Image: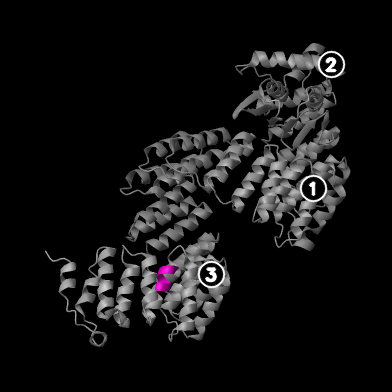
Amino acid sequence: METISTPLLSLPHHLTPQTVNSNHDQPVLSFIDRCTNSNQLKQIHALMIRTGLFFDPYSSSKLFAASALLPFSSLDYARKVFDQIPKPNLYTWNTLIRVYASSREPIQGLLIFLRMCNESPYYPNKFTFPFVIKAAAEIFSLSVGQALHGMVIKASLGADVFISNSLIHLYFSCGYLDSAYGVFMMIGEKDVVSWNSMITGLAQMGRAEKALELFRIMEAESVKPNDVTMVGVLSACTKKLDLKFGRWVCSYIERNGIHVNLTLSNAILYMYMKCGSLEDAKRLFDKMEEKDIVTWTTMLDGYAKLGEYEAARRVLDTMPRQDIAAWNALISGYEQNWKPKEALSIYHELQQSKIAKPDEITLVSTLSACAQLGAMEIGECIHAYIKEQEIKLNCHLTTSLIDMYSKCGDIKKALEVFYSAERRDVFVWSAMIAGLAMHGQGRAAIDLFSSMQETTIKPNSVTFTNVLCACSHAGLVKEAKTFFNQMEPVYGIPPEIQHYSCMVDILGRAGLLEEAVEFIEKMPIVPSDSVWGALLGACQIHGNVELAELACGHLLELDPGNHGAYVLLSNIYAKTGKWDSVSRLRKHMRVTGLKKEQGCSTIEVNGVIHEFLAGDNCHPLSGEIYSKLDEIVMKLKSVGYVPNKSHLLQLIEEDDMQERALNLHSEKLAIAFGLLYGKASQPIRIIKNLRVCGDCHSVAKRVSRLYNREIILRDRYRFHHFSGGQCSCKDYW
């Protein structure tokens, strides 16, 4: 059988550059296309240099193209071949730009292009521009793209459909929809790629309706869509969550005989899942003959997002290859559906199995779960893992770490992460401002906002929400009014409903209830349930029954099933001794099936999360916990503590039962557990799902002094740092 080495050895050795340059039909060149590995190509390369054939521009370009484009090609080797060519022809320059544009170093394609323009006698042609424009798109460089667009026009190549399609892709990559559309409209004879680029780009930029409109125009102009078109159209359907139209698209594909490849099947599957049609997705998944990691992950992610966790787990266990994207889908599904314990359990399983290595998405989701639970020990382990693995802290991870430390009660560590960050975007700044706000450090949050203004980073809507929250928790009414009034005229950010809610909360907490009502009446947008909820919460703080009834009425008009509104009003009635009104409201809640959210507190000890409900006796150590609680109460009474029975929210006539009911609050059980089993050198960190009551707040202050322990308690609204008998909130919460 003939081998590639035999003819190489039998080639005439008397070939000279002169004879080679006049003949492109050299036998050696015919073997280049028959190479099956890099060693064979290198043999030909060596022979071409020895015989002088390499110095013929045509021959060297053929060798270079093979070294760059064949399946076994190596970019490093191809670059070395290129650098040996004395005078590369235009085809060779174009090929190198093309290879770099599709590589991990697209910027090298731009640098080669500049070298070509400066060092070679060639001007870029219609084959050069699509490759170099792609390289600019890969690095999202609008300025370079616009410069290339200018060169295209100067070279009278603006009508070339391939170049125009590349420019459309570039402008969409850089987020410039109008520029992309302008190029599209200038194309005389649009091909299917032109339409596909526009439809896909519009869908990806959230202009789903426009994408579907363009698809209808494409049909009207008798341009036959292909599988890529339908992927773009399905993406638009998915963005709109339009299942009905998505099903029509599927029937259209079938009617028009469009080839359904794996990519298109995955797009259909994703559309069904995102639009909530689990049955359609299952049916398609079961009949798909070919499946890849995207297929499996789409199913898993869909089940997880819809709360079908057992089904999601079955998919993970059945997958032929469990890559990190699949694990991320399950962790993220739990975390986004407020199941942080389950998310952390999957993360621990992933680490122990070592099937896949956690990536940035894994860590962001897991840190978010830690933040929800207040699981700082686990969060610290993740931070240590990031350092150990030398994972570079991008803005996503930095934001997640700041959020985790802030919500777990360690604002100092959150600040350490913030100040050590190499790069800070608006989300990093906003997260740190939010952290300071929830810890009651309003002045520090405002100072940080001032520092942000000295940088090039512009605040966004979220930043202002966090700044206003900082003002609310610190009682900074004057400052809040200034920031609110500056939002649109100074920063160009129109106040949204959350900003109005913050202002009502600020005024209400400060006792300016009438001003809060006047503010609501003058709002240019319709007050939402959050606005009336803020007013109702302020009424609870200040015991204003009449205004509470007004706020509750408006709130229930907007959200009749809001059990929190009934509970707040009931609590206000209870605090003011209106027990008949309490009974009436609670009877209504029983009849309508509305249930009060039960008080729940969690505490992390040695990396384990312990959960306590009000009056809980389910914990295996309940006996010891209640004995410790009795000891705490006795010690507190010995130094003058008197239970504040005005915080009882149910009518109990016997004094001893009243006191017992107060002692059953979940945060008191968590404090007792922390004193028993937490390390004396570490703060007792507690997370509560509801607002801490005044009696528990008083007990925590006294315990911090009596037992010389720092207690950090996060309730629904903010953090309380108890130390030496004082609280960081200064009793303003």
Q: Is label 2 in a helix, a strand or a loop?
A: helix
Residue 598 is drawn in which quadrant?
top right
Query: In the figure, 458 relative to 647: above or below?
Result: below
Residue 459 shown in magenta = no
Report the residue marked by disc 3. 171
Report the residue marked by disc 2. 637
Main secondary structure of the magenta stretch:
helix
Q: Is residue 678 left or right of residue 52?
A: right
Q: Is label 1 in a helix, a strand or a loop?
A: helix
- Dot 3 crowding, Cα within 10 Å, few <14, some 14–19, many 20+: many
Q: Position of residue 341 (x, y in %)?
A: 56, 33
Q: Is label 3 in a helix, a strand or a loop?
A: helix
Q: Residue furthest left?
A: 1
Report the residue marked by disc 1. 444
Q: Position of residue 384 (x, y in %)?
A: 58, 41
Real-space Cα separation, disc 1 to disc 2, in angstroms: 37 Å
For badge 3, the amino acid type reads: Tyr
Query: In the figure, 197 relative to 418: above or below?
Result: below
